[in-house]
Amino acid sequence: MQSLTYLQAIVIGLLQGATELFPISSLGHSVLVPAWVGGDWQQLVTQESSAESPYLAFIVGLHVATALALLVIFRRDWVAIVKGLVMSVRHRRVETVYERMAWLIVVATIPVGLMGLALEHALRVLFAKPEAAAIFLTVNGLILLAGEWLRRRAKRRTDVAATGEESGDELDTAITESVRLPDAAIIGGLQVGALFAGISRSGITMVGGLWRGLSHEEAVRFAFLLATPVILAAGLYKVPDLFGSLGNGIRGQVVAGSVAAFLAAFVSAKFLVRWFRTRTLVPFAVYCLVVGLASVVRFA
């Protein structure tokens, strides 16, 4: 089996950290980029679909690093959310913004958590191939365009671009006023789509937020909050693999790749929060359609 080099570890870490948060699918790119490059990189694609793969153990470290970057950026929110959940359970009430936000995240995480445990490996084996990833990346582009169509049709509040930048508390309040528990369950269910290589977790949850009338800035904030426990749990669930035989010979590469993923995720999240204050999903949709269709032609 091919040994993972430090160069590959850093490049894949940067790719993972950025594409996990950009609405263009990290799993799809982890399949398509090595396939386009070819050679030794192509072998990484086949390793990704193996249950006992050192490469898969390496990817685990990248997921944890990405989630940690989100935790650092939204640390104030997460402290308030955890306190809100504790107070809500203790007093058996749901009154404050962060008590409501805590339960929205809990309800949204349950569907993807259960489906991930049941189907994640089976779907990776079946669809983590260049042909399938190309098709799903194209579909992802259409989903993003549909989100913009839904946004235009939704009953809208005043856009951030017209009223000025909102504070974090104002954004969180707007989210909890627009999204109810049944909505959270639906949006959480949509995250299951990210188990298919080519469908973006952040993209599909943003579309769910736009469907509920959130602004783009609110939708990306909610998407990142929802993604954090899912990405972190997926990584921590398989962290023990890194301390077993699968981690032999790649632990240094895991550290290098994880640092790269953390930095890429941190910069990407900061960039996207600013981007969606005034801009839309359309450029990302166009990117997915162009790259997806080109990949369909290349690998079909």
Image (spheres, rainbow, N blue to C red):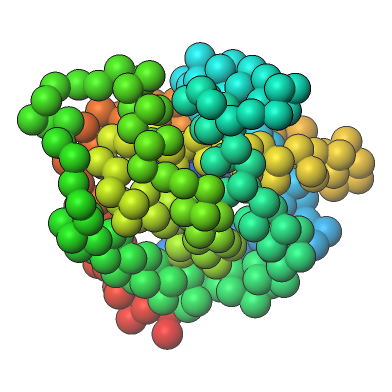
Nearer to me, 89 or 24: 89
* Label total for image: 0
x and y percent of residue 289 in the render? 27, 68
Q: Position of residue 112 (x, y in %)?
A: 63, 56
Q: Is residue 90 visible?
A: yes
Residue 137 vs 254, above or below: the answer is below
Q: Position of residue 198 (x, y in %)?
A: 46, 64
The image quadrant of residue 90 is top right
Q: What residue occupies the far bottom of the structure in this picture?
A: 300
Horizontal side, residue 56 vs residue 63: left or right: right
Residue sitting at 19 percent across and 40 percent down? Answer: 157
Residue 223 falls left or right of residue 3 = left
The quarter in which the N terminus is drawn is bottom right
- Which residue lies most toward the left here? 162
Above or below, 119 against 68 in this view is below
Q: Nearer the viewer, residue 294 or 213?
A: 213
Q: Is residue 53 above or below residue 98?
A: below
Residue at 30%, 17% (x, y): give it: 167
Q: Residue at x 53, y 26 (%)?
A: 95
**Residue 137 falls in which quadrant of the image?**
bottom left
Residue 61, quarter of picture:
top right
- Who is closer to the viewer here, 67 or 81? 81
Residue at 52 percent of width and 55 percent of height: 182
Examine the rendering and report whether any part of residue 15 can be seen: no
Instruction: Give the quadrant of the C terminus.
Output: bottom left
Q: Is residue 175 left or right of residue 2?
A: left
